[in-house]
Image (tube, rainbow, N blue to C red):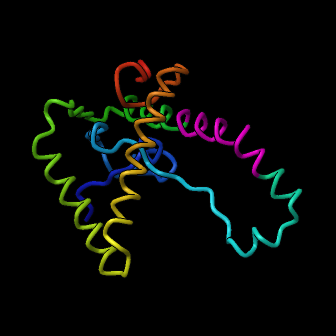
């Protein structure tokens, strides 16, 4: 049995979690942003002709990122709308009320660091990854505010009004 997951609202529909749950706790100040990666095998990438690499890179940088971000926001808003219409209990934990949540999240992060160290990675390298992700979250949240992009959760300035 699963007691809880840290997942976006869109999973209420796309993963059909809406069929097995009726409660959501929003803890966006601790981790509403989920990291997604667009990856390719480095050997395969290096085998592509330079002009094809350039086309792919240009498309990703100039069009794909914005389309992807908007798509994720749209389906997440749909997922929250689904939860609201289905009568979910939605509990919103505000930044000032995080207390124990922050302690538990810190333990999860530290356990992750130690598991990666045990797997052979340098502790500073792993912490660097986490610092990078935190910095990017802050950067993109500010960009989101600047551009007026709405989300299912997050700071009031970006929150879609249902």
Residue 27 within the segment the image draws in magenta: no
Q: Position of residue 85 (x, y in %)?
A: 40, 29
Quarter holding residue 8? top left
* Image point (31%, 54%), residue name: 5
Q: Position of residue 73 (x, y in %)?
A: 53, 34
* Image point (67%, 71%), residue name: 41
Q: How many marks are shown on the rendered structure? A: 0
* Magenta portion: prevailing SS class: helix
Quarter holding residue 1? bottom left
Image quadrant in which the C terminus is located: top left
* Left or right: where 113 falls relative to 67: left
Residue 63 within the segment the image draws in magenta: yes
- Residues in magenta, as a range: 57-74
Q: Is residue 154 above or below residue 123?
A: above
* Image point (29%, 41%), residue name: 24
The answer to whether any part of residue 162 appears in the image is: no
The answer to whether any part of residue 70 appears in the image is: yes
Between residue 161 and residue 36, name the one nearer to us.
Answer: 36
- Outermost residue, left side: 100
* Left or right: where 39 falls relative to 121: right
Q: Is residue 154 above or below residue 108?
A: above
* Left or right: where 75 falls relative to 128: right
* Image point (52%, 49%), residue name: 14
Quarter holding residue 96? top left
Q: Is residue 25 above or below residue 133?
A: above
Between residue 60 and residue 149, name the one nearer to us.
Answer: 60
Q: Position of residue 57 (x, y in %)?
A: 75, 50
């Amino acid at each position: 049995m699963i007691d809880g997951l840290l997942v976006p609202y869109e999973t209420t529909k796309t993963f059909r979690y809406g069929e097995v749950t009726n409660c959501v706790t929003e803890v966006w100040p601790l981790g509403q942003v989920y990291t997604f990666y667009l990856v390719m095998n480095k050997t395969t990438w290096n085998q592509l002709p330079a002009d094809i690499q350039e086309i792919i890179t240009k498309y990703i940088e100039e069009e794909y990122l914005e389309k992807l971000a908007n798509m994720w926001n749209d389906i997440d808003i749909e997922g929250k709308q689904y939860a609201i219409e289905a009568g979910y209990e939605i509990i919103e934990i505000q930044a000032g009320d995080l207390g124990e949540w922050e302690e538990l999240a810190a333990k999860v992060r530290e356990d992750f660091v130690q598991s990666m160290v045990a797997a052979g990675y340098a502790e500073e390298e792993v912490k660097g990854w986490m610092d990078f992700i935190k910095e990017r979250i802050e950067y993109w949240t500010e960009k989101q505010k600047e551009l007026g992009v709405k989300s299912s959760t997050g700071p009031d300035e970006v929150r879609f009004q249902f």
